[in-house]
Image (tube, helix red, strand yellow):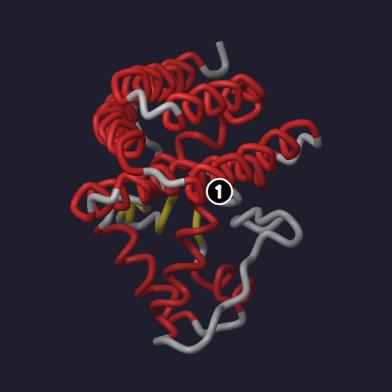
Amino acid sequence: MLSTGLPPGAVPKLERPGPLRDRVYEALLELITTRALQPGQHLVESELAGHLGVSRQPVREALQRLNTEGWVDLRPAQGAFVHEPTEEEADQLLTVRTLLEAEAARLAAAHADSAGIAALEELCAQGEQAVADDEVDTAVALNARFHTKVMELAGNTVLAELAAQVDRRVRWYYTPIARQRGHQSWIEHRGLIAAITERDEARATLLMREHTEHTRRSYHQRGR
């Protein structure tokens, strides 16, 4: 097996146009976020370049950028490795996520229209089906889209920008517990939709806070 250990079909296509180094960066970040590249995994420039069909230079530049952003660790005389987040790192980020998402839920309950609620219902139905089909990657992606939609319905640009800064890492932490959270996560989403539909700001805030706290606790309890 190659050091990068990429499963078949995991490598995303490099979308055009755009600078090659940016496209390689996005491709590697997606592989890390989805855990196709696991925390602690050795990243070999030549092998990654071969997978992506590019030279080593844009891969090197992407790895340096990912190191700056905390996704990759560059170790002297050893090379690049996917960062292994500490429990404290995960806890801090997921706690901030709870604060942002709870406020988004409150604002969504105040401002969401029928079209927005219908979009949440559709995403929830798709998520439930993904769980039923044991399509973990699809369920993770739909979970992210559901929360992004709630943020969109909140109508607060600054809040959305702050949430976007943590969204990738939320997906990173959610992926290993997605099967564990399973159908319960989507039951909680259904309750949230009901609160938003009823324009119950207090209940929407409470449900989202409980929902995100369940995810935080599940992450810390994983593998026990």
Q: Residues within 10 Å of mark 1 (few under 14, many from 20)?
A: some
Q: Residue furthest left?
A: 158
What amino acid does circle 1 point to? Answer: Ala
The residue at the point 51 percent across, 42 percent down is: 117
The residue at the point 24 percent across, 59 percent down is: 68
Q: Nearer the viewer, residue 59 or 101?
A: 101
Q: Is residue 92 left or right of residue 12?
A: left
Q: In terms of image quadrants, where is residue 11?
A: bottom right
Q: Is residue 80 left or right of residue 117?
A: left
The residue at the point 46 percent across, 32 percent down is: 197
Quadrant for the N terminus, please. Answer: bottom right
Q: Residue furthest right?
A: 133
Q: Nearer the viewer, residue 124 or 79?
A: 124
Q: In terms of image quadrants, where is residue 207?
A: top left
Q: How many marks?
A: 1
Residue 49 position (above or below residue 70): below
Q: Nearer the viewer, residue 97 or 112?
A: 112
Q: Helix or strand or loop: what does disc 1 sit on?
A: helix
Residue 100 point in image, percent of width and height? 26, 36
> Which residue has dot 1 on it?
119
Quadrant for the C terminus, please. Answer: top right
Q: Nearer the viewer, residue 46 or 146?
A: 146
Residue 135 point in image, percent of width and height? 74, 41
Residue 200 point in image, percent of width and height? 35, 23
Residue 167 point in image, percent of width and height? 38, 47
